[in-house]
């Protein structure tokens, strides 16, 4: 009896643990809405504008993995920026994160001599993925960014 | 008979005999069973606690939601790998800081109706290129404001120096909405064309510049062109600047060493305002432009004037309009000496009429708001060099001399600018893939020459906006 109870408990625990990691591919993100929210609510040192340029031409994603996206950039005075992209599938997000990181590293190198005050924001850049979506957020309020991303399912 | 000691065996224990022995044994057995049962219960209890702990850790939020009946987000695992720069800061709610000095574009005074002449010559002493102390001024976010002519007109100040009138009461703007005092009577200034081009004109263009050019790229709405831009780039040390490309960070010269372009748009000078000595600015600029020409022999080089700054907002003393004027003198001189270089006089639309940037066209006095970037794009779309040498410009005869020169150079098969402009006839081979739009340019130029001058389109607040 005891052994039976023990066995049942172990099976239940295993089932619960397995159920925790099975829903990442079901997420749906409002790319435009999320990008807009991040741009408006996390940047206080300036303003960001939705760029007409395709993020692919800015961050140089692999064409085989990138699908579409939105990017918000500044007038050139601050390092803050937001990019929310959709990959063709979840496996493409690794390339997206890699390109985001390379971009941030490049910006850090430039801003160290141009405007050192902006470097801290770049070092605290938020780069996250969920499902087939990837996000880059360089902002003044990373806490707010994390909160918005969490609400969006990241 | 002496009492016999009971046989205790090797253990020395007193063994009860008969019924007492069996009852003792049974009592010991039951106690052992009780102890065993108790330990089993404890183990099960511990396991249950473990299960509960696992539930709380992994599904705690769900359980909380279930009990509180609040709708919560779907918990998904983070799938991304690699280096993660996420900072696990605590969530803080911040209030929007509405600044008293709201620099939202919606509240910007009409740029064509007003001009700010009351410039404060004093400047703060912090870095100007980026202006780290910017938070106090505040700003609207996300740049979603749209041109509101009525609101802009209503914001007109009663101070005569901030109106569009000059000291004698006449308008500072011409019929095209350009600042009269910024007109340049020079053959190498790009003329206004009666026919505006669209974005496709820039498909074979490369834009080289500093943070202002980057800001233009992302806020003007332009959709075409290649970009070799980098914050902090200077004309006087351009070889040290690196730009990001799909192939990694490279120099501007490396970026110009591959694909051939028909046009090069250059916007530099803002980071050269502290350059010294000024006598060396022109030779340095000429050297850079000549190298560009060697790498891109078929390209017209459009040199954008250094846009004025709003000195009251700038925090570095050498970033001032007197130095802007010096830089522009050097750029104009370079254009006079090099036939393939043309001067794009942006201050015609971005000046307040008193050799300063339009008031509140920028948050930090240097980088333009979205609205003014769009104005700049419109200006580029109706200021270009047409392909034919003579009679191609409908607006000004003063440019004929420069275009005539270009025509003569083309006849001598020397000038790359002329070759680019007349690319339908000549081809250097390496520029084959850069000349797709030059035929269209030729047609546009020919049409402009053939048609009678048309009135300027959509004149909003005196500024021509072409979308």
Image (spheres, coloured by chain):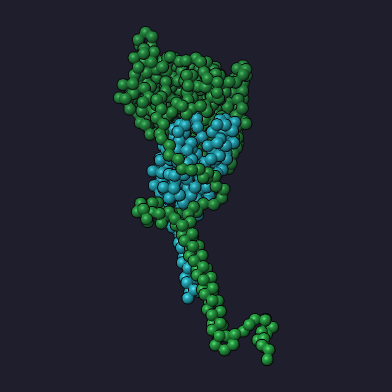
**Image vertical order of residue A49 relative to residue B126, above or below:** below
Residue A49 at x, y percent in the picture: 43, 35
Residue at horizontal 45 percent and vertical 31 percent from the top? A46
The answer to whether A79 appears left or right of B148 in the picture is: right
Instruction: Name the residue at the front extreme.
Output: B1
Residue at horizontal 43 percent and vertical 39 percent from the top? B93
Instruction: Name the residue at the top extreme.
Output: B168
**What color is chain A drawn in?**
cyan
Chain letter for the part of the structure drawn in green: B
Q: Is residue A72 visible?
A: no
Q: Is residue B357 visible?
A: yes
Closer to the camera in the image, A106 or B132: B132
Residue at horizontal 34 percent and vertical 19 percent from the top? B156
Residue B399 at x, y percent in the picture: 46, 19
> Which quadrant of the view contains residue B375?
top left
Closer to the camera in the image, A43 or A61: A43
The answer to whether B87 appears left or right of B146 in the picture is: right
Report how many numbered discs are placed on residues in the image.
Answer: 0
**Image vertical order of residue B47 relative to residue A89, above or below:** below
Residue B102 at x, y percent in the picture: 39, 26
> Which quadrant of the view contains residue B60?
bottom left
The answer to whether B231 appears left or right of B439 in the picture is: right
Residue at horizontal 48 percent and vertical 19 percent from the top? B311
**Image vertical order of residue B378 relative to residue B223, above or below:** above
Closer to the camera in the image, B230 or B345: B230
Residue B268 at x, y percent in the picture: 54, 26
């Amino acid at each position: 009896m005891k052994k039976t109870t023990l066995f049942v408990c172990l099976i239940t625990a295993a089932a619960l643990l397995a159920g925790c990691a099975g829903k990442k591919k079901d997420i749906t993100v409002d790319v435009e809405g999320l990008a807009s929210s991040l741009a408006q609510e996390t940047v206080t040192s300036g303003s960001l504008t939705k760029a007409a340029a395709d993020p692919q031409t800015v961050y140089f994603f692999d064409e085989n993995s990138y699908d579409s996206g939105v990017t918000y950039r500044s007038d050139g005075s601050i390092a803050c920026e937001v990019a929310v992209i959709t990959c063709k599938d979840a496996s493409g997000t690794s390339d997206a994160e890699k390109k985001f990181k390379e971009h941030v590293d490049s910006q850090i190198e430039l801003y160290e001599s141009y405007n050192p005050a902006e470097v801290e924001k770049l070092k605290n850049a938020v780069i996250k993925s969920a499902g087939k979506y990837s996000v880059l957020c360089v902002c003044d309020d990373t806490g707010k960014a994390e909160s918005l991303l969490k609400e969006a399912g990241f | 008979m002496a009492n016999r000691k009971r046989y205790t065996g090797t253990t020395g224990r007193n063994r009860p005999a008969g019924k007492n022995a069996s009852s003792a044994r049974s009592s010991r057995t039951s106690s052992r069973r009780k102890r065993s049962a108790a330990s089993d219960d404890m183990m099960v209890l511990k396991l249950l606690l473990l299960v509960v702990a696992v539930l709380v850790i992994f599904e705690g939020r769900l359980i909380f939601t279930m009990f509180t009946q609040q709708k919560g987000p779907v918990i998904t695992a983070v799938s991304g790998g690699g280096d993660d720069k996420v900072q696990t800061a605590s969530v803080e709610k911040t209030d929007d800081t509405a600044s008293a000095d709201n620099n939202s574009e919606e509240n910007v005074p009409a740029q064509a109706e007003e001009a700010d002449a009351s410039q404060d010559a004093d400047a703060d002493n912090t870095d100007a290129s980026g202006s780290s102390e910017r938070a106090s001024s505040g700003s609207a976010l996300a740049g979603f404001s749209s041109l509101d002519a009525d609101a802009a007109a209503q914001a007109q100040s009663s101070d005569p120096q901030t109106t569009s009138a000059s000291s004698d009461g006449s308008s500072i703007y011409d019929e095209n909405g350009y600042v009269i005092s910024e007109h340049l009577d020079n053959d190498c200034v790009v003329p206004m064309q009666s026919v505006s081009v669209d974005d496709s004109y820039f498909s074979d263009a490369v834009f080289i510049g500093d943070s202002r050019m980057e800001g233009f790229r992302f806020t003007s709405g332009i959709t075409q062109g290649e970009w070799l831009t980098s914050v902090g780039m200077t004309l006087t040390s351009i070889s040290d600047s690196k730009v990001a490309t799909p192939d990694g960070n490279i120099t501007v010269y490396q970026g110009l060493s591959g694909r051939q372009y028909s046009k090069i748009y250059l916007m530099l000078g803002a980071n050269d305002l502290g350059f010294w000595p000024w006598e060396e600015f022109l030779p340095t600029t000429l050297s850079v432009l000549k190298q560009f020409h060697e790498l891109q022999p078929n390209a017209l080089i459009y040199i954008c004037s250094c846009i004025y700054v709003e000195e009251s907002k700038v925090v570095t003393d050498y970033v001032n309009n007197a130095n802007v004027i010096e830089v522009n003198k050097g750029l104009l001189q370079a254009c006079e000496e090099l036939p393939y270089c043309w001067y794009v006089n942006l201050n015609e639309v971005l000046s307040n009429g008193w050799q300063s940037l339009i008031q509140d066209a920028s948050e930090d006095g240097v980088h333009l708001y979205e609205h003014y970037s769009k104005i700049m794009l419109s200006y580029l779309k109706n200021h270009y060099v047409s392909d034919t040498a003579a009679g191609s410009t409908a607006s000004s005869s003063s440019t004929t001399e420069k275009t005539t020169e270009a025509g003569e150079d083309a006849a001598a098969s020397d000038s790359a600018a002329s070759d680019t402009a007349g690319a339908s006839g000549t081809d250097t081979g390496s520029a084959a893939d850069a000349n797709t739009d030059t035929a269209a340019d030729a047609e546009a130029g020919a049409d402009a020459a053939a048609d009678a001058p048309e009135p300027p389109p959509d004149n909003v607040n005196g500024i021509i906006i072409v979308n």
